[in-house]
Amino acid sequence: MNTNLQNTTILNNGVAIPNIGLGVFQVPNEETAASVSTAIKLGYRHIDTAAIYGNEEGVGTGVANALRENNLSREELFITSKVWNDQLGFEETIAAFEESLQKLQLDYLDLYLIHWPGTDSFQDTWLAMESLYRSGKIKAIGVCNFDVSHLQQLMSFATIKPAINQIELHPKLQQHAVREFAQTHNIQIEAWAPLMQGGLFEHETLLAIAKNHQKTVAQIIIRWHIENGIIAIPKSTKEARMIENAAIFDFDLTADDLTTIHALNEDQRVGPNPMTFNF
């Protein structure tokens, strides 16, 4: 078991979040339980799902099995879900949260996120999330896919600052403006598609860096996220790949490596642009 997977970052409300998690985007519900159980057995403690993924039930089953099989307590895990766009609004968000909690077979969530900002439709949802947070049903609240303007709008009415902004982030999309704003306001950045959904595995520059360190490109990229203070949630259903993704704690990138990777940014997305993606 890789205990380094339990290294954490402290969020702005004092909650600890593991620096590497397991994403389950596009994993079929019937496969999710086994993937989650395997990941937890290997040392992963951070699982990231969402209502729209359609696999919260699988996550819940996998978590329940892993707790029993590995003699773990619920408090040792960090479970995230997200409210989807068709459930934005105060009462709708409360109902969506309770549905997610039921599917996950949990009493509370460690992190609950607004999945997309949409067009000026997240104020009531955020206020509902603040209410759930104050009630103790969520340990931390945050957002996904918020650009600087969305964060500014949110903070104009929020009484609780978001703990997390989960965004698409990888060497081809480094999100410098959002990261700078988040750092200024003590909001933790978390990366989805940290490996660009496999789109960087044959990149010549990254292959050269990987060869120098006798590592894989995936390991170089995940290490790059960690060294930049970014939470990473790579997705995999294969045990060997889960092990590979976690084997990043026995080397450091050099200053030249970091400079070289910094130069790869092209603002290239594999997902929608939150500034134009309208629900």
Image (cartoon, rainbow, N blue to C red):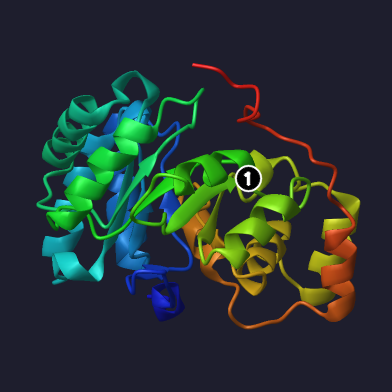
Q: Residue at x 90, y 64 (%)?
A: 260
| Placement of 201 over or under 125, stated as above or below | below
Residue 188 visible from this viewpoint: yes
- Tell me residue 196's x, y (percent): 67, 43
Dividing the picture into quadrants, the one containing residue 212 is bottom right
Q: Quadrant of the N terminus?
A: bottom left
- Tell me residue 131's x, y (percent): 19, 47
Q: Badge 1 is on which residue?
A: 148
| Amino acid type of the residue that numbered disc 1 sits on in the rendered structure | Val
Front residue of 246/97: it is: 97
Classify residue 95 as left or right of residue 80.
left
Q: Residue at x 69, y 66 (%)?
A: 224
Q: Residue at x 61, y 40 (%)?
A: 149
Q: Residue at x 66, y 73 (%)?
A: 227
Q: How many marks?
A: 1
Front residue of 208/13: it is: 13
Dividing the picture into quadrants, the one containing residue 93 is top left
- Tell me residue 195's x, y (percent): 65, 49
Classify residue 223 as left or right of residue 165.
right
Classify residue 259 as left or right of residue 55.
right
Dividing the picture into quadrants, the one containing residue 113 is top left
| Placement of 239 over or under 251, stated as above or below | above
Which element type, helix, strand or loop, lies under badge 1? helix
Front residue of 231/130: it is: 130
Q: Residues within 10 Å of mark 1 (few under 14, many from 20)?
A: some
Residue 145 visible from this viewpoint: no
Q: Residue furthest front?
A: 156
- Tell me residue 122's x, y (percent): 40, 31
